[in-house]
Image (cartoon, grey):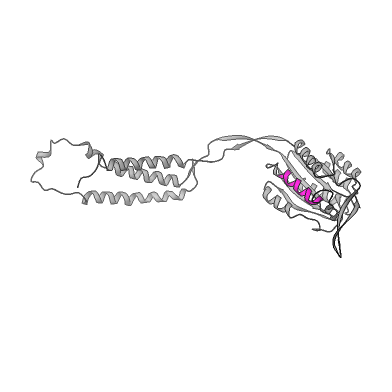
């Protein structure tokens, strides 16, 4: 048994002045009677009250000691438990180029991707998940973490225009690999979402895919965008107007990346399809691990608090009934 607040035991030092006060009171608070001789009382029977007269005070000391023990918060930590958890590290790699503002997905591609990614994160509370964003360059928005509150807050802040424009798929993938290369997880996964063709960066997408395979990382690629053309907002002198822009996704390269790393390629043409893709990946990446953990601490103060209450009530009962002092 451990105690969360052991410093409360210093209150037990108050027992000494309490006992001293009681002894002093017993000596000075009783009325005296002077008699010439006590021989007449020598054979008088003694009442049980004489032997029990100190019991109420003893009960008070016990009640006080039990209250102090309850305040110290005794905790039981003597059991083991087994739990099942996911042994997967995941990096979400998100394209934030300005083409992600196209509104073939609602309200636009970037916001739809963030919404579905947030739902995916909430559905995997035990996994380490990180976030990498890329456009003309790439950087880690959030390293691998199980603190999904922080991750979701950082995901919420993601938007187009954060970094130099362009589509450096190879750089985005390489940065994600660097986040996972030292991972000891049983399964390492990258989910890469983009809506374009690699046109920036010094690292070719397939080269980055080969590196991922070397580290045993599986890459799921998602091409997001409708077939044909998509409405894209353009600022003008009269406000925002929409221009239909051709959707150009390099599905061949994205498919090859997935094949090289033993992953899969998906095409998301609307919000419903995108949600279904993340749901499918979520179901595929379920690696159960049995973990033996020491049990959580159990609070044990209640039994001491109840015992203190019983002792206090018993003291009151005895003091004002069978052991009541008559002046």
Q: State the residue at coordinates (20%, 37%).
A: 47
Q: Position of residue 121 (x, y in %)?
A: 72, 45
Q: In the image, 44: left or right of 297? A: left
Q: Position of residue 270 (x, y in %)?
A: 83, 44
Q: Tell whether position 246 is magenta.
A: no
Q: Nearer the viewer, residue 148 or 185?
A: 148
Vertical side of 99 occupied by 324: above or below: above
Residue lying farthest to the bottom in this orientation? 237
Across the whole image, how many numbered discs are drawn on residues?
0
Vertical side of 94 occupied by 296: above or below: above
Q: Position of residue 235 (x, y in %)?
A: 85, 61
Q: Is residue 199 visible?
A: no
Vertical side of 247 occupied by 302: above or below: above
Q: Position of residue 108 (x, y in %)?
A: 81, 51
Vertical side of 319 occupied by 100: above or below: below
Q: Nearer the viewer, residue 178 or 140?
A: 140
Per the rendered image, the range of residues in magenta is: 108-121
> Mainly helix, strand or loop, the magenta region?
helix
Q: Quadrant of residue 285?
A: top right
Q: In the image, 234: left or right of 28? A: right
Q: State the residue at coordinates (42%, 48%).
A: 9
């Amino acid at each position: 048994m451990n105690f969360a607040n052991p410093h409360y035991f210093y209150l037990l030092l108050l027992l000494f002045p309490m006992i001293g006060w009681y002894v002093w009171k017993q000596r000075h608070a009783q009325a005296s009677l002077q008699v010439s001789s006590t021989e007449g009382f020598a054979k008088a029977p003694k009442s049980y009250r004489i032997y029990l007269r100190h019991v109420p005070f003893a009960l008070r000391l016990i009640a006080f000691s039990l209250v102090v023990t309850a305040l110290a918060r005794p905790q039981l930590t003597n059991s083991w438990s087994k739990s099942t958890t996911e042994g997967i590290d995941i990096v979400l790699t998100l394209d934030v180029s300005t083409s992600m503002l196209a509104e073939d997905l609602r309200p636009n591609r970037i916001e739809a991707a963030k919404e579905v990614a947030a739902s995916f994160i909430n559905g995997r509370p035990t996994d380490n998940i990180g976030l990498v964003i890329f456009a003309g360059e790439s950087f880690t928005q959030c390293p691998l973490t199980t603190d999904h509150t922080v991750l979701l807050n950082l995901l919420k802040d993601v938007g187009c225009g954060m970094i130099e424009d362009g589509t450096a798929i190879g750089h985005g993938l390489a940065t994600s690999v660097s986040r996972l290369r030292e991972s000891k997880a049983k399964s390492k996964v990258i989910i890469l979402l983009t809506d374009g063709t690699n046109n920036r960066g010094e690292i070719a997408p397939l080269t980055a895919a080969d590196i991922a395979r070397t580290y045993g990382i599986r890459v799921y690629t998602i091409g997001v965008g409708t077939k044909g053309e998509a409405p894209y907002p353009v600022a003008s002198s009269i406000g925002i107007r929409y221009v239909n822009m051709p959707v150009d996704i390099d599905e061949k390269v994205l498919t090859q990346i997935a094949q090289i790393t033993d992953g899969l390629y998906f095409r998301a043409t609307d919000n419903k399809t995108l949600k279904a893709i993340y749901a499918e990946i979520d179901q595929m990446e379920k690696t159960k691990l049995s973990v033996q953990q020491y049990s959580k601490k159990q609070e044990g103060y209640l039994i001491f608090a109840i015992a203190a209450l019983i002792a206090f009530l018993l003291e009151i009962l005895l003091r004002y009934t069978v052991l009541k002092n008559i002046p």
